[in-house]
């Protein structure tokens, strides 16, 4: 399974399991549907995958300091899109 396929699958499962916001899932799926945007950016895609895997809607609150927030994932998506 390729990195984009893993990212797509993980985004969907994290949405179902821990409530990854639908708007983020849509953005991730759109990115996965345009592989030309991610060519040569394997390191950044790997980072995004790890962030999606570690998403927690309570990130940054109390003892959840090691989890990743929606804002962090959005920032990585923007970097991949060149914003």
Image (cartoon, rainbow, N blue to C red):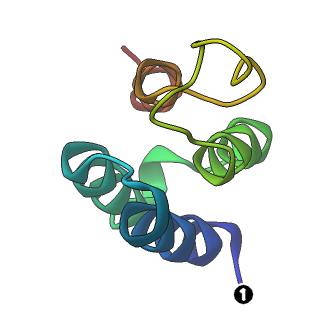
Q: Position of residue 81 (x, y in %)?
A: 39, 30
Residue at the farthest front position: 62
Q: Residue at x 28, y 46 (%)?
A: 21
Please name the residue that numbered disc 1 is placed on.
Answer: 1
Secondary structure category for the residue under label 1: loop
Q: Position of residue 30 (x, y in %)?
A: 27, 57
Q: Quadrant of residue 10?
A: bottom right
Residue placed most toward the observer, 3 or 59: 59
Q: How many marks?
A: 1
The quadrant of the picture occupied by the C terminus is top left
Residue placed most toward the observer, 46 or 72: 72
Residue placed most toward the observer, 34 or 65: 65
Q: Position of residue 43 (x, y in %)?
A: 80, 39
Q: Residue at x 57, y 42 (%)?
A: 55
Q: Residue at x 57, y 77 (%)?
A: 5
Residue placed most toward the observer, 12 or 32: 12
Q: Is residue 17 left or right of residue 33?
A: right
């Amino acid at each position: 399974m390729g990195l984009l396929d893993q990212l797509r699958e993980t985004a969907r499962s994290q949405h179902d399991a821990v409530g990854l916001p639908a708007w983020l899932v849509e953005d991730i799926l759109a990115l996965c549907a345009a592989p030309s945007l991610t060519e040569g950016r394997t390191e950044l895609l790997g980072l995004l995958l790890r962030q999606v895997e570690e998403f927690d809607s309570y990130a940054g609150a109390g003892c959840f300091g090691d989890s990743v927030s929606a804002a962090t994932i959005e920032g990585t998506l923007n970097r991949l899109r060149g914003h």
